Image (cartoon, grey):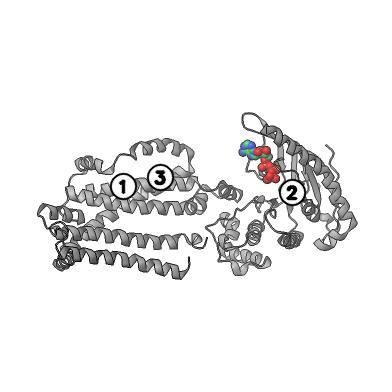
């Protein structure tokens, strides 16, 4: 499979180092005794500091792939190499698909979770969490429990929980899929702002082509059943990006259209497969 | 639920028993009820005052409460820890679950003779009876509580590299707490039943003993006082436990 060479991003060429942060080679995953193929030979390099987006139809193995990259699951075959740049920081933090805040912890305690688990001194935990909650506008809700927050606020707390832990790599599994358009737009802007300031490697999963093009440096389109890498595209837009201005550009529309065309086939194929299973 | 509706519920809850007691009193006074079996509430209240004044009631209540408290600790604490460990560890669950399922259906009252045989007539036998009653609901509810914790929370724990102990403290325990509290409530109810039964058979003090003794010497008023005290204790326990639950599980307050 051909992988487009990495273009250095404008203004931040130093972030593209020679050894990739994540290097996948022939990663496959089979489930159950029937040997259902969820992932089939994914080969991919993700450079340090890149915002890497994966799009694909439902059930094509996106979450499975992310869990393998995060070490929460193991691949059936193939290798995943994670190259550390800073041994002192945690390798990765995951923003899970769906609600994953602890209902029994306040906003503050949820946000502090990663830091506390690695026994960072409490004064420093307090400082870091304060800064992050302030930055994302949730400091005054710090004593609330998740069930006292809106869906958008909960999602922001999950983002803070991951960012406050200061990992080298962030995995985000459809973090905004349950949100309305306005909230989504605001969070896209917030996420871009935070990410552009922290230079982390991000692997971001989404169903939304708009989201992929708005946020990503590179987009991998996946096929369904079995999950394979169908194409990898560069997103040519410079940073920092303005979400609204970006969407007015003709080249934005072209890229979205191009990705949709590729995806449509896959979504249709996935649907046919699903119907075939039902019979 | 609005405060108004809550207030109304509370008023209804207080008025109903008072009306029933009034009817009982009248029926007993006018000979509609046989006063040998159903003495009028006024006579029971009088007997209550007498027993309080003599110190007899206080001594019996304290004796029972002491056994209840010791038994709850003796049965509840191991049940809690074993339950949490079983909830986390599948092999441990596989090893111990069958034992619990097999012994749980045995009525605890049926074990009383065996407990008396082993522990004798001293305090220990009563404490052990309460402990047996407390053990099962707490361990069963704890295991279920931990096992039902959404897997995603454990994934979060692993992703943030929580140690086994940290997972236990930050996820298993708080996640299972609502279920554990339900178990503790059942355990206290079971403890009250068992303490009354064991004191009837094998004690020289305590509320159970007081009721049984009253039957033997046919002081029916005292018997009713005993029943009343047990009912009130049960009610007080449920208020205290609700309050503890409220404080221990603040995230369930506003769902
Ligand atoms: N533990 C498992 N056991 C068996 N099959 C599984 C398991 N986990 C996932 N699968 C299957 O693997 C495939 C990929 O699942 P995955 O959750 O990775 O999809 P996804 O791309 O994240 O979908 P979505 O966009 O809906 O979240 C699906 O067909 C799913 O049914
Ligand atoms: Mg998924």
- Spatial CA distance of label 2 from label 3 is 42 Å
Quadrant that contains the C terminus of chain A: top right
Per the image, label 1 sits on a secondary structure element best described as helix
Chain letter of mark 2 equals: A
- Spatial CA distance of label 1 from label 2 is 53 Å
Q: Position of residue B220 (x, y in %)?
A: 14, 58
Mark 3: C-beta under 8 Å from nearest atom of ligand 1: no
Q: Which residue is mark 1?
A: B133
- Spatial CA distance of label 1 from label 3 is 12 Å
User: Considering depth in this image, is A65 or A174 the residue closer to the camera?
Assistant: A174
Q: Which residue is mark 3?
A: B140
**Vertically, is B252 above or below B89?**
below
Chain letter of mark 3 equals: B
User: Which numbered disc, 1 or 2, marks the residue closer to the eye?
Assistant: 2
Quadrant of the picture in which ligand 1 is shown = top right
Label of residue A262 in the image: none
Q: Tag 3: Cα neighbours inside 10 Å, few (<14), some, or many (≥20)? A: many
Q: Residue at x 30, y 58 (%)?
A: B234
Q: Position of residue B65 (x, y in %)?
A: 25, 58
Chain letter of mark 1 equals: B
In the displayed orientation, state which residue is furthest to the top: A34
Mark 2: C-beta under 8 Å from nearest atom of ligand 1: yes
Q: Which residue is mark 2?
A: A207
Do tags 2 and 3 sit on the same chain?
no
Left or right placement of residue A195 versus residue B204 in this view: right
Quadrant that contains the N terminus of chain A: top right
Contact, CB < 8 Å: mark 1 with mark 2? no
Ranked by sequence position, the earlier of labels 1 and 3 is 1
């Amino acid at each position: 499979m051909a992988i487009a060479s990495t273009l250095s991003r404008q203004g931040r060429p130093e972030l593209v180092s020679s050894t990739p942060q994540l290097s996948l080679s022939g990663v496959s995953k089979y489930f159950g005794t029937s040997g259902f193929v969820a992932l089939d030979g994914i080969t991919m390099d993700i450079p340090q500091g890149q915002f890497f987006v994966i799009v694909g139809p439902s059930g094509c193995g996106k979450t499975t792939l992310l869990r393998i990259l995060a070490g929460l699951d193991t691949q059936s075959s193939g290798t995943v190499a994670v190259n550390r740049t800073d041994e002192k920081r945690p390798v990765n933090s995951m923003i899970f698909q769906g609600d994953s805040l602890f209902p029994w912890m306040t906003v503050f305690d949820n946000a502090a979770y990663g830091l506390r688990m690695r026994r960072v001194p409490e004064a420093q935990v307090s400082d870091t969490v304060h800064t992050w909650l302030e930055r994302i506008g949730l400091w005054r809700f710090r004593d609330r429990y998740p069930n006292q927050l809106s869906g958008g606020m909960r999602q922001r707390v999950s983002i803070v929980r991951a960012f406050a832990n200061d990992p080298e790599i962030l995995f985000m599994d459809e973090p905004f899929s349950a949100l309305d358009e306005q909230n989504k737009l605001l969070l896209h802007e917030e996420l871009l702002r935070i990410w552009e300031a922290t230079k982390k490697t991000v692997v971001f999963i989404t169903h939304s082509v708009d989201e992929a093009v708005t946020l990503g440096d590179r987009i991998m389109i996946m096929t369904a059943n079995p999950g394979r890498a169908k194409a990898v595209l560069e997103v040519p837009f410079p940073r920092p990006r303005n979400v609204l201005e970006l969407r007015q550009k003709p080249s934005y529309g072209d890229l979205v259209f191009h990705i949709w065309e590729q995806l449509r086939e896959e979504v249709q194929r996935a649907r046919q497969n699903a119907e075939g299973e039902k019979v | 639920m609005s405060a108004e509706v809550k207030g109304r519920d509370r008023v209804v809850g207080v008025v109903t028993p008072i009306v029933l007691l009034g009817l009982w009193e009248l029926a007993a006074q006018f000979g509609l009820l046989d006063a040998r079996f159903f003495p009028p509430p006024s006579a029971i209240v009088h007997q209550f005052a007498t027993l309080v004044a003599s110190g007899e009631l206080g001594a019996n209540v304290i004796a029972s409460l002491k056994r209840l408290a010791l038994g709850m600790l003796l049965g509840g604490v191991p049940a809690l820890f074993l339950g949490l460990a079983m909830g986390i560890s599948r092999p441990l669950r596989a090893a111990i679950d069958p034992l619990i399922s097999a012994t749980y259906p045995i009525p605890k009252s049926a074990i009383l003779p065996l407990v008396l045989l082993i522990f004798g007539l001293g305090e220990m036998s009563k404490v052990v009876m309460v402990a047996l009653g407390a053990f099962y609901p707490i361990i069963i509810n704890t295991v279920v509580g931990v096992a039902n914790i959404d897997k995603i929370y454990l994934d979060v724990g692993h992703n943030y590299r929580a140690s086994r102990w940290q997972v236990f403290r930050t996820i298993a325990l708080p996640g299972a707490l609502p279920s554990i509290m339900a178990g503790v409530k059942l355990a206290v109810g079971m403890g009250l039943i068992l303490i009354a039964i064991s004191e009837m058979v094998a004690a020289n003090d305590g509320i159970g003993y007081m009721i049984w003794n009253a039957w033997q010497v046919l002081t029916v008023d005292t018997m009713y006082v005993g029943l009343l005290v047990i009912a009130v204790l049960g009610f007080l326990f449920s208020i205290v436990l609700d309050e503890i639950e409220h404080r221990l599980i603040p995230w369930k307050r506003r769902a």
